[in-house]
Image: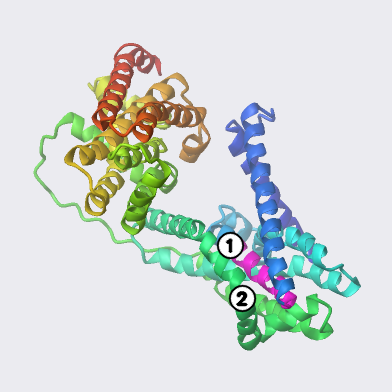
Amino acid sequence: MNKTILQLVKIKISGGISSMITFMRGRAAKDKSFNLGTAFIFAIIIIAFLFMMVFSFGMAMVLGFQMYSKGCMWLFFPLAFIATTVFSLVGTVFAAQSYLFDSKDNDLLLSMPIKPSYVLVSRMMALYVLNFLYVNMIYLPVGLAYAFFFKFNAVTFLYYFISVFLIPLLATSLSCVFGYMTGKISQKIPNKNMLSVIFGFAVIGLLTLIIINFGDMLSVLMTDIDFLALEVRKYCAVFYWYGLATCGKMTWGYFPMTLFTVSFTYLVYIFLSGKFMEIITRKVSQKKKVYVEKPMKKQNLQWALIKKEVGYFFSIPAYVMNAGMSTIMSIMLGVGILLRGNQAVEMLPQLFPDASSNLIALVIGSSLALCCTINDVTAPSISLEAKTMWLLKSTPVKPMNIFFAKALLAPIVSLPGVIFTAAASAVMLDLTAADITFIVVIPVLACLFSGFLGICVNLKIPRFDWSTEITVIKQSMSVVFSLFLSMFFTAIPFVLAIVPAAYLEDYSSLWSYGLCIIYFVWLVALEVFFLATDGKKIWNSFS
C-alpha cells in the first residue's frame, strides 16, 4: 500500500487519540500529567467495553443453546454478522460525515502534492479502524461462545478470523453511504443544530425503546429461532451459505459474502471518489438577511436574561443532548403511564397490601423529581461565561438577576415532560386534585433546587480555561458534583415519604406532600441565601 496513505491514516488516528486524551484531561495539550479525572474516565471506558463484551458473550450463549437444541447452529455466525454490523453502524454513523468530508485539515492536504484519492482512502481506513473496534466488542465474545458448542477446526477458524476484518469493511461502507446522505440533507436544512438535536434524541428514543422491550424481543427470538432460520434460508441465501461455511459444512459458501462485501466497498469508493472534491470544496450559499427596521421595545431585564440563557442552551446541540435528558425521561415516564398505567395500579396492592391509596402519586412525583435532577443545565453555566463575562460585568446587571435567570432555565427545560406526565396521570389514573398538584409542584421545586445547586457548585468550582463548550458541559467537575449531590438530596425526602405510605393504610399522603414541599423550599432558600451573600462575592472576584 502507498506510504502516503499509511502516513495519512497514522496522522488521523494518532490525532484522534491525542485529542481524546487532551479532551478528557481538560488541560492544554502540552500538559502530559495523568490526573485523577483522566484515570476515572479511562476506567469508565474500560468498564463499558468489558460490560459490552460480557453482555455479548451471555447473549451468544443463550441464543447458541437454542440454535444447538433446534438443529440450526449454522444461523449462529450470520446472526452475529448482522448484529455487529448494525451495532457498528449506529456507533460510527455520526462520525462518518466529519471523518470523510468535514475534517479541518482538508484544505491543508489539498494544498499539498497529495492525490485526493489518497485522502479519501485514508479517511475510509481511519473510519474502518473505528468500526473494527466496535465490531470486535461483539464478535470476539461470540467466537468464544461458539467454542463452547463446537471446537474450531482449521477451516472454520480461518473463516472466523477473516470475518473479524470483513464485517468492519461492510460497516465502513454503510457508514460512508449514510455520511454522504447526511451531508446532502444537512445542506438543505437551515437550522442544522436543531436537526442534530432531533436526530440525536430520535436515536436515543429508539435505543431506549429497544432496551425496554428487549425481554419480549429476546423471548420471541428464542421461541421462534427455527422459524427465523427457515426465513433466512429461504430469502437470504448468501447468509445461509455463509453460516454453513463457518460451521465447516460448505467450503465455498464463504466466498459469496466476501465477494459482496468487497464489491460493495469498491462501488462506494468509486462513487465517493467522483464526489469527493465537489463535496469538500463546496460553498453552501446562504440567503442574505435583510434588515427590517422595527420599533425598539423596552423589555424587562429579568426576562431578557432568561431569553439569553434559553437561546444559548438551544444553540449548542451537545448542551441540549447532555443536559436535556430529563425531559426525554419524563416524557417516557408519561408514555409508560399511558400504555401500562392500569397495570401499575393493579400491581401496587399486591406488592404493598397495606399501602395508602395515594402511594401511586408519591411514586410518580418522586420519579419525575429524580428525572429532573438529571437536568444539569446550570452546572456549567458560570464556566460557559468565560468569554463573555466581561460583557455582563460591564452592564448594570445585579449578580442575583444573572443567578435567577440561569436557575430558571432548569424548570423551563424540564417543564414539558412534567406537564405531559401529569396530564397522562390525570387521564389514566384515579387521582385527586391534590395528587395532580403534587405531581406538578414537586418536580418543579426539585428543578429549582437542582438549578440553584448547579450555580452554587459552579461558582465554587469554575473552569474558564476551556477551548470548546463541550469540555465544560461534559467533563467539568462541577457537572459531576452537581449531578450526584442533586440526586442524593432529592432522594432523601421521598424515602421518608414513600416508606410510611407503602406500609400504613391509614396514612395520609398529605403529610408526605407537605414534607416534600417544605424540604425543597427550605433547600432553595438556603441556596438563594448563599448566592446573595458568598455567591455575589465570588462572582465579583472573577476577572
Which sits in the foreground, 119 or 224?
224
Residue at 14% of width from left, 32% of height from top?
A: 300
Q: Is residue 86 part of the magenta span, yes or no?
A: yes
- Position of residue 503 measured from the top left corner of the image (x, y, whole percent): 38, 33
- The quarter of the rendered structure image containing the C terminus is top left
Q: Helix, strand, or loop for circle 2? A: helix
- Position of residue 17 measured from the top left corner of the image (x, y, whole percent): 67, 45
Magenta: main secondary structure equals helix
Which of the 4 quarters of the picture holds residue 222?
Answer: bottom right
The local crowd at label 2, few if under 14, some if 14 to 19, many if 20 or more residues have their Cα within 10 Å, is some
Q: Establish if 109 lies above or below 150.
A: above
Residue at 26% of width from left, 50% of height from top?
A: 429
Residue marked by disc 2: 268
Q: Is residue 397 left or right of residue 536?
A: left
What amino acid does circle 1 point to? Leu
What amino acid does circle 2 point to? Val
Q: Helix, strand, or loop for circle 1? A: helix
- Position of residue 138 measured from the top left corner of the image (x, y, whole percent): 69, 59
Residue at 65% of width from left, 52% of height from top?
A: 52
Q: Establish if 13 lies above or below 296.
A: below
Q: Is residue 537 visible?
A: yes
Residue marked by disc 1: 100
- The quarter of the rendered structure image containing the N terminus is bottom right
Q: Colour mode?
A: rainbow
Query: Which region shows up in magenta?
Result: 71-88
What distance separates the C-alpha of mark 2 from that of mark 1? 13 Å
Which sits in the foreground, 523 or 467?
523
